[in-house]
Image (cartoon, rainbow, N blue to C red):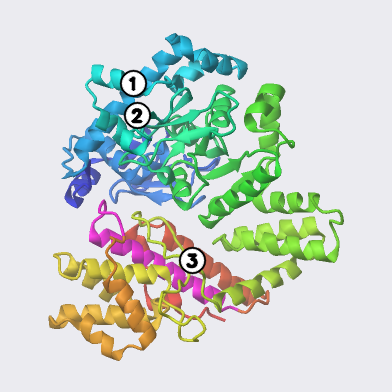
Amino acid sequence: MAFGIPESTIEEIKSRTDLADLISSYGIQLRRAGGGYMACCPFHHEKTPSFHIHPDKGFYHCFGCGESGDCIKFVQKQEGVSFIEAVKKLAAGCGVTVEEKEDPQAGQRKRLLELHSQLADFFRRCLLQAKEAEPARAYLASRALPDAIVAQFKIGYAPLSAEAMRTWAKKYGFSDDDLVAAGVLLPPKFAGGSWYNRFGGRLMFTITDRQDRAIAFSGRILTNDKKKAKYVNSPETVLFKKSNVLFALAHAAPCIVKSPRREAIVCEGQIDVIRCHACGFPVAVASQGTAFTEEHVRILGKCADSVALVFDGDGAGQKAAVRTGGEFLAAGMPVRVASLPPGEDPDSFLRTQGPEAFQARLDAAESVTSFQVRSLLAHETKPYSLRTVTDVSRAALETIAKCPSAVMRATLIDEAASLLGVPSTALQEDFLKAAAAAKRRPAPLPPVQPEPDPEVENVSEPVPLEGVDAASPRANPPPTTETALCEFLMEHERDAARPSLELLLADYMPDAVLAHPFTRAFVGAWRAGEASGVDAITALRSDLSPEMCVWLDHILLNEEKSVSSELSPEKILQGFLRKLWMEAVRRRQGELPAESTPENDAARLRYSTLIRQLQRGVWDRARALMCPATLAAPES
């Protein structure tokens, strides 16, 4: 296996791919329009074509929904695959050989993939043939899961005996060390003197990657032994990282991208997801043994444009739905919550009520804010008392504050105000006050590294560093995007990419874009070092305050790479520039008076449009906006 594709190869693939032919190959009807083509957008429903294709320039743009990109982005969106997968698909179609950089873990990955594939087949045979697997077969029969679905999801049974596992492994050419590396067995020195079978006697769910290859397992207990965990998952390996895996995504992604709304269903459990697929809802996924994370949202966002959460109907399920909904809001993805009766989960509801009733629940799904407000009010004896309204509104505003979209925030505030019986202007005023207060205090969050995909937007917040007095008015550290930019520049301080990076900074990074004086000083010193050949970063220390010296040490001592190596340094810096310009425009937008006047509203709309253009446009279009006029005061 390998990682990273040379930029020259990617450019050759783009030049050999006819964008119009590619798009029409997906059954999209094109018609000539000047030097390009037009079509009804494949990413949203429309009757009047607003999807423009420019084969000579190699990009498309929809003036209806704002989607734009090149041939690689189109395949990613249309098929819900990763960047690398899209590149490989296009390369195969245009006769380009993809030579990837060597992966030092390739051998271990290949061995583990082969082992997991064989284990999945072995567990399947045990389920179907082993006498001791009768409780597993009885359990599946009690859940009324069709045989075809059981086979599709590679459900099996793990034998009780660790020696049975070792005997099987030897027969198929695998060693004890292989089983230990996969997390199936624990050796005697860690298991009280004898081999320990992690999954012994459990119903086995196969966890697969995006290509539907087995990479881990989840085992469900079949007894009433309360001393044992209900589910046991594989430990993390070079194949399996819980934060990077969504259960059933390999089956769901093709269905999501072909669904009318490109909407995914997110459940809490594996059985819930399997039941959804069995009952005609093949767009369902779930996280794997962990709460939904920002990374899960990013992965699902590659194939889904919106999400419907269907969690358990109890209090814990309601809280999980609000927390998970907040993760999607933070990514700017529309998210709805479908309510289930108390004590029900998607599996039980579909078995007892059927698909039509489940679809009705999906159709009636409401925004996460409306769901949160209704759920909180339902638990109060005096739902419209001053105390209750104050507490619920505060909780709702905390959720709404995660959303970067001004339009979405305004809509959610209106919904919450209506349910609470208060004027939306009052809730808006409280929101603005809370936002202003949040800006004045450091956010107690750990640093967040930027994603390798430059199209992904991450809004930065200040992060306190060790050694800095948080009470000092000068102690607010740089936003995380700016810190990550400094770390990135240090990574490339002495390599061949530095001259091209310096040109990008000279052309598109005026001081006004950076929010923090430390970042401005650091970037200036880095560029001065390129021009003079001296170590300007080290010399910078004498000009910094004690607080800033701590931040400088944090950057110089950071041993982790800030971004993936799949992209070239130039592409990564372009991603940073997009984010920093969007944050600068947001700061300008936040400086506008809160009062609603035609002038203020027009300015807000102008800034919102600029943010969208910076986020959605290809680099050549986005960089045209990276000029002083973008940050200039709006015309009165």
Viewer-nearest residue: 96 or 183: 183
Q: Assess disc 1: are there few (<14), some (14-19) or many (≥20) residues with their C-alpha within 10 Å of its C-alpha.
A: some
Residue drawn at (18%, 69%) of the image: 498
| Count of numbered circles in the view | 3
Residue at numbered disc 1: 163
Viewer-nearest residue: 282 or 571: 282
Q: Which residues are magenta?
A: 563-592
- Secondary structure under the numbered disc 1 in the rendered image: helix
The percent position of residue 476, horizontal first and vertical second, equals 46, 79
Q: Is residue 520 magenta?
A: no
Circle on res. 315: none
Which amino acid is tagged 3? Leu
Instruction: State how far apart marks 2 and 3 are (Cα).
Output: 42 Å
Residue at numbered disc 2: 195
Instruction: State how far apart marks 1 and 3 are (Cα).
Output: 47 Å
Q: Assess disc 3: are there few (<14), some (14-19) or many (≥20) residues with their C-alpha within 10 Å of its C-alpha.
A: few
Residue at numbered disc 3: 445
Check whether the beta carbons of the residues at disc 2 and disc 1 lie within 8 A of each other: yes
Residue 575 at least partly seen: yes
Of all residues, the one furthest to the front in this rendering is 193
**391 sits left or right of 587 in the view:** right
